[in-house]
Amino acid sequence: MAVKRMREGKRVVGTMVRMVKNPAIALLASHAGLDFIMLDLEHGPYNLETVDDIFKVGRSVGLGCFVRVPELARGYVSRIMDAGATGVMVPMLESVKEAELLAQWTKYPPLGGRGFGGVGGHTDFASIGPEATPGFMAKTNEETIAIAQIETAKAVEDIDLIADVPGIDALLIGPNDLAISLGCAGDLMGTALDKAIGKVADAAKKHGKIFGLHAPEGLLERWIPRGCTLIMNNLDANILSAGMKAISQRYKT
């Protein structure tokens, strides 16, 4: 499982899914050797039923089932977790208070205050009896992750405090929005963004958090040797487009 590998300090690789709704996307990702997919509810059209359907398949084959929610809200975070997500990422998280809320809503007591729903995608639709509840909660806290997406200058400024919040498992850079926030839009390989990412990587190492990037190849190649273990590249629409373009260019010339 992706979460277990990351907690062991191992590298995991996945992609963002924003367009495909067929649950078979989880099988395609698994057959391709990916460790996880992340469904994008911030910029994508998915509803909770779609998330639930895809993750039924994903969990059955041991695929990491991550979601980027549209915003930090209990109604999104808790329902996404109960739909079977093994990781929840909040975009533009930029304060200790927001990090504390994310941890509170993704973790069961005593680490957080996640509400207990006894049957659902998160239990693989098995009933969890009262006697099994404490063990289930502890196991779930270990097997799921709360991801703070760092993509504003304010978040970088306060990153040491954010990274110190118990229950926050990973810090993942969103380089495009972070570059915009830093005043260097589009310059993903420049000095300003490099310095900001370095500050986040250092905070992750200091506080024992997972360090991640959703980025193009050049940026990933720069940061994987420097501790990036949560690796996300590309998204489904681009992957399909590139495949179709390759067919077109090969046979129309």
Image: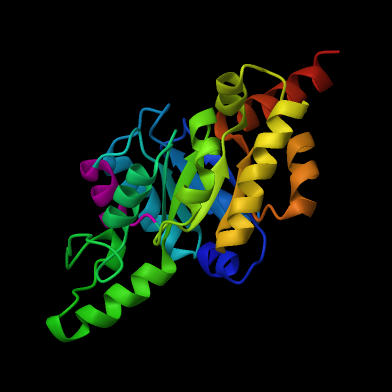
Does residue 71 lie above or below 32 as drawn?
Answer: above
Which one is nearer the viewer's eye here, 153 or 226?
A: 153
Which one is nearer the viewer's eye here, 229 or 234?
A: 229
Which one is nearer the viewer's eye here, 142 or 124?
A: 142
Does residue 21 lie above or below 137 as drawn?
Answer: above
Q: What main secondary structure does the magenta stretch of the protein show?
A: helix
Q: In which quarter of the image is the C terminus?
A: top right
Q: Quadrant of residue 196?
A: top right
Q: In which quarter of the image is residue 9?
A: bottom right
In the rendered picture of this protein, how many numbered marks are placed on residues?
0
**Residue 92 percent coordinates (x, y):** 44, 33
Examine the structure image and report whether residue 17 is included in the region drawn in magenta.
no
Q: Give the range drawn in magenta.
A: 74-85
Residue drawn at 69 percent across, 30 percent down: 193
Question: From this viewpoint, is residue 11 visible?
Answer: yes
Residue drawn at 65 percent across, 49 percent down: 201
Does residue 189 lie above or below 16 as drawn?
Answer: above
Most extreme residue toward the right is 253
Instruction: Give the colour scheme shown.
Output: rainbow
Most extreme residue toward the left is 130
**Residue 14 percent coordinates (x, y):** 60, 48
**Residue 13 percent coordinates (x, y):** 64, 52
Q: Is residue 127 rendered to the left or right of residue 234?
A: left
Q: Is residue 36 rendered to the left or right of residue 33?
A: left
**Residue 105 percent coordinates (x, y):** 27, 54
Most extreme residue toward the top is 253
Question: From this viewpoint, is residue 83 visible?
Answer: no
Which one is nearer the viewer's eye here, 67 or 63?
A: 67
